Image (cartoon, helix red, strand yellow):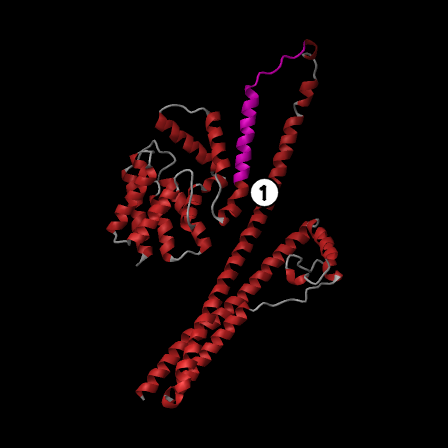
Amino acid sequence: MNYQLLLEEVKHFVLLFFKNHDDKRFSYHNKAHTQDVVAAVNQIANHYQLNDEDFFIVSTAAWFHDTGYSGGVADHEARSAQIASDFLTQLNVGAAVIDKVKSCIMATRMPQDPANLLERILCDADLFHLGTDEFRRKSKLMRKEAEQLAETDIDKQHWRQKTIDLMENQQYHTDYCRLLLADKKAQNLARLKQREQEAQAAQKPKPPKPEEQVPQAAPIKLLPELPKETLRDEKGHKKEKPEKGVETMFRITASNHQRLSGMADSKAHIMISVNSIIISLVVSLLLRKIESHERQLIPALLLLTVNLIAIVTAILATRPNLPPGTYTQEDMDNRRINLLFFGNFYKMSMDQYMANMHTMMNDKDFLYGSLIRDLYSQGVVLGRKYQLLRISYSVFMYGIVASVLAFVLSVLL
């Protein structure tokens, strides 16, 4: 099934649907929001490297998830799921795929409770803006939409409190979004709470000032000091943003490396298992009766050779390499050692390692340099793993074809 072509059909249908059901009251839940959610789904799904079917399911659910607003706010998820089901049925999409699309859409119902990775991806994409710079603008659009639907003004402080409650109860469900968006979401929530405190403080009646304090200039003298501290806090906060962004980058990259390493080990395990089974079958069924099948001897040996090479390269891809486990004080003084990799210190004493770790934590350049070395080392190991795996899979692919042809020729000739 050509899922890419089907996804284009879905996109065309939903865009036309929003055009035909344009309702100016929905300033937030509209085509623009849907396109934002689809973009967020693509970003998250690409991180998890979904297969074609799963990518189609979660993307289709993202396109349809708010189409049900055409019939009103209540139970819009159920209507959206039904609209998606009706259209996908017309495209002859399988019932199992349609059910998964509907489940993803229904998972966005508040409070969110996704049951699998696809549902978690769509739920996080639907509230992706809570952890971005777009949060404030989209919150204003949501308030405007709520006012237009209720045909009345909504108190700003009441709306702010509802938003705070939402953000405090909402948690991102995927590791990717937790790493990428948690810091910014916390900043957005902190700003909301600060505004709420300021609004509450402004509503409290101020105590009357004693008559003898009215002509004093002391309060006036304190006025310029407050904004200076606020500015210093804001500047300090801005200085922290790049560091948080860098730390987020390190976490996401390290997570990607670990995931890719796990995928490589899984692929190597598959290759070892498949070739071991083939070797067992060839040895037990053919080589024991080779006297009566002399013509199959060369093809059998060719097949065994292919299997052995594929197994050996797959084992080499997962075989660990252990460094000496020690380092010199000169390496430490010149900041040439990576204290974050166990292979560099597992033979060192606890006291020495702890002292050197404190030194690294107090030296920002050394700390970030160690993180960079760690990522680079992981990348080198991954490169070696995938090179050996490519050799293993290539040998198996071409070798199995050559072996089968050799068996066919031995029978025909």
Residue at (49% x, 25% y) in the render: 157
* Quarter the N terminus occupies: bottom left
* Quarter the C terminus occupies: bottom left
- Seen from the viewer's position, the closer of residues 375 and 320 is 320
User: How far across and down, in percent of the image, does residue 337 sit?
Assistant: 68, 60
Q: Which residues are magenta?
A: 185-210
Q: Is residue 332 above or below residue 168?
A: below
- Residue at the far left in the pictured view: 90
Q: Was residue 189 drawn as part of the magenta stretch in this picture?
A: yes
- Is 263 situated left or right of 68 in this image? right
Query: What count of labels does the image hold?
Result: 1
Helix, strand or loop for disc 1: helix
User: How far across and down, in percent of the image, does residue 156 sit?
Assistant: 47, 26
Residue at (53% x, 35% y) in the render: 189
Residue at (58% x, 42% y) in the render: 241
> Can see residue 132?
no
User: How far across and down, in percent of the image, does residue 268 sit?
Assistant: 48, 68
The residue that disc 1 covers is 241
Question: Can you tell which quarter of the image residue 379 is in?
Answer: bottom right
Question: Can you tell which quarter of the image residue 197 is in?
Answer: top right
Q: Was residue 46 drawn as part of the magenta stretch in this picture?
A: no
